[in-house]
Image (cartoon, rainbow, N blue to C red):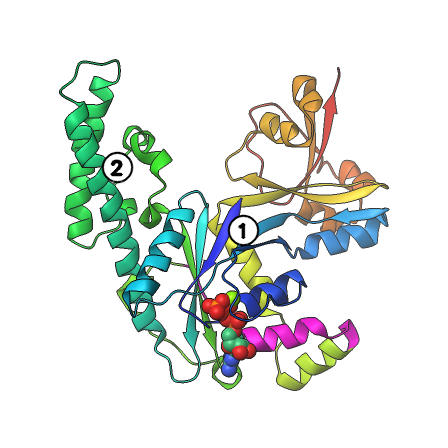
């Protein structure tokens, strides 16, 4: 799963990603798209690692793309933005990083960004309409589908011209299938990071109606970056001085994970304690396939303990004795924090 950090120039995207990935900052003014593998913080893994003392602990990760900053001030920066948007059509979600320091207005930037997303999608719709209008008159195998798509694209044109997002007008799976491969920007899940000054972290930023229903986090990227560079002891001390208890950067990664619709199931043992990312709603059988195709093929049962029970009873044996170990079948929908031992036979 890929999340792309997008925002105006110098909004703090690289600083934030460097803080959560531990990778050094890219050179100033870099126009490359950097791809960083970011581990998803998970206290449950820490607790299970203490319990099992495994050889290794493997966290879930998200691929984060650090995009060059946008500007919409002149023709050449608009061209650059358009080119960048075209490269964003295959990503899974956006993290919009808004600059809320140095007197910059984050609400204004969010409006500008939304407008540009809409214009970019509208351009794509118009190109599609032009192509489909020629195509639908010629008899072909895809004629019926082309007609349906044309009608839908016209509906999307109306919506985008009225400044509505594609996601707000797609009504069902059939429509989604017709346009899925086009990668509309205003169809993608999105979260917002307000990058504020260190001393304004408690301020309520009003982003207006655009941000309604969108996961929003306020943090100070440069502070998170400083904290990430400290060893654990100094970090705890420094955080206590500042009166903060958790790293906002950790919350940011967790929110990304949630926005992508991901949950984690966990596996435990002497060799490895591990979190496996899974699309919410996935069956035990498909979860087994994430680990290995053999486990899916030979699936017998998913021996499952919820993390909450594991923590309460203190171990596998204790959970079994208390009747907290469940034997789930193929169609069981895996829940976040399920600790699973797959029984299989090949
Ligand atoms: N005051 C303050 N400055 C910050 C904060 N976050 C980043 N900066 C500074 O803003 C500048 C830009 O930070 P970057 O992380 O490079 O921003 P960017 O969005 O990656 O920039 P581009 O890739 O050029 O668009 C740097 O000088 C940072 O030190 C913050 O939270 N507060
Ligand atoms: Mg950058």
* Residue at x 40% of width, y 44% of height: 89
Which residue does the numbered mark 1 point to in the structure image? 257
- Near-viewer residue (139 or 211): 139
Task: Report the quarter where the C terminus lies.
Answer: top right
Q: Position of residue 110 (x, y in %)?
A: 33, 66
Q: Is residue 248 left or right of residue 51?
A: left
In the rendered view, tell whether residue 55 sits above or below residue 102. Answer: above
Residue at (30% x, 72% y) in the render? 108
Q: Is residue 14 above or below residue 152?
A: below
Seen from the viewer's position, the closer of residues 29 and 218 is 29
Label of residue 171 in the image: 2
Magenta stretch, residue numbers: 215-233
Spot occupied by residue 14 in the image (x, y as percentages of width and height):
55, 66
Circle 1: element type = helix
For residue 135, which quarter of the picture?
top left
**Residue drawn at (27%, 48%), measured in percent from left and top?**
121
- One can see residue 146 in this view: yes
Q: Is residue 224 magenta?
A: yes
- Residue 218 in view here: no
Q: Residue furthest front?
A: 76
Residue 7 lies, in percent from the top left, at: 41, 64
Considering depth in this image, is 344 or 4 the residue closer to the camera? 4
Q: Secondary structure at mark 2?
A: loop
> Label 1 to label 2, Cα distance in Å?
25 Å
| Neighbours of disc 1 within 10 Å: few (<14), some (14-19), many (20+) | many
In this rendering, the answer to whether 229 lies above or below 338 is below
**Label 2 crowding class (10 Å Cα cut-off): few <14, some 14-19, many 20+?**
few
Q: Does residue 36 sit above or below 176 in this rendering?
A: below
x then y, percent, for residue 345? 75, 17
Instruction: Assess whether mark 2 and mark 1 are in contact (beta carbons under 8 angstroms).
Output: no
């Amino acid at each position: 799963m890929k999340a792309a950090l997008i925002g105006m120039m110098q909004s703090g995207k690289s600083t934030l990603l460097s803080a959560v990935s531990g990778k050094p900052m890219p050179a100033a003014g870099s126009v490359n798209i950097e791809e960083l593998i970011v581990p998803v913080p998970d206290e449950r893994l820490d607790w299970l690692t203490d319990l099992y003392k495994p050889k290794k602990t493997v966290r879930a990760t998200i691929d984060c793309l650090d995009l060059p900053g946008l500007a919409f001030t002149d023709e050449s920066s608009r061209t650059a933005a358009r080119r960048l948007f075209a490269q964003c059509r295959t990503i899974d979600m956006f993290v919009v990083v808004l600059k809320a320091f140095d007197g910059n207005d984050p609400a204004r930037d969010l409006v500008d960004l939304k407008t540009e997303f809409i214009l970019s999608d509208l351009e794509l719709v118009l190109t599609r309409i032009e192509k489909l209008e020629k195509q639908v008159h010629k008899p072909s195998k895809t004629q019926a589908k082309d007609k349906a798509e044309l009608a839908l694209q016209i509906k999307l044109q109306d919506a985008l011209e009225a400044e509505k997002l594609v996601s707000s007008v797609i009504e069902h799976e059939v429509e989604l299938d017709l346009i899925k491969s086009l990668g509309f920007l205003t169809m993608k899940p999105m979260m917002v990071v307000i990058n504020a000054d260190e001393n304004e972290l408690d301020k309520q930023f009003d982003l207006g109606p655009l941000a309604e229903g969108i996961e929003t986090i306020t943090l100070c990227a440069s502070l998170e970056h400083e904290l990430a560079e400290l060893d654990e002891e100094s970090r705890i001390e420094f955080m206590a001085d500042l009166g903060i208890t958790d790293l906002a950067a950790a919350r940011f990664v967790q929110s990304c994970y949630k926005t992508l619709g991901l949950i984690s199931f966990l596996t435990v043992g002497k060799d490895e304690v591990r979190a496996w990312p899974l699309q919410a709603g996935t069956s035990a059988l498909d979860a087994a396939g994430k680990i290995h195709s053999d486990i899916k093929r030979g699936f017998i049962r998913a021996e499952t303990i919820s993390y909450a029970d594991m923590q309460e009873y203190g171990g596998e044996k204790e959970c079994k004795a208390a009747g907290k170990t469940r034997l789930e079948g193929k169609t069981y929908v895996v829940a976040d924090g399920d600790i699973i031992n797959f029984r299989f036979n090949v």
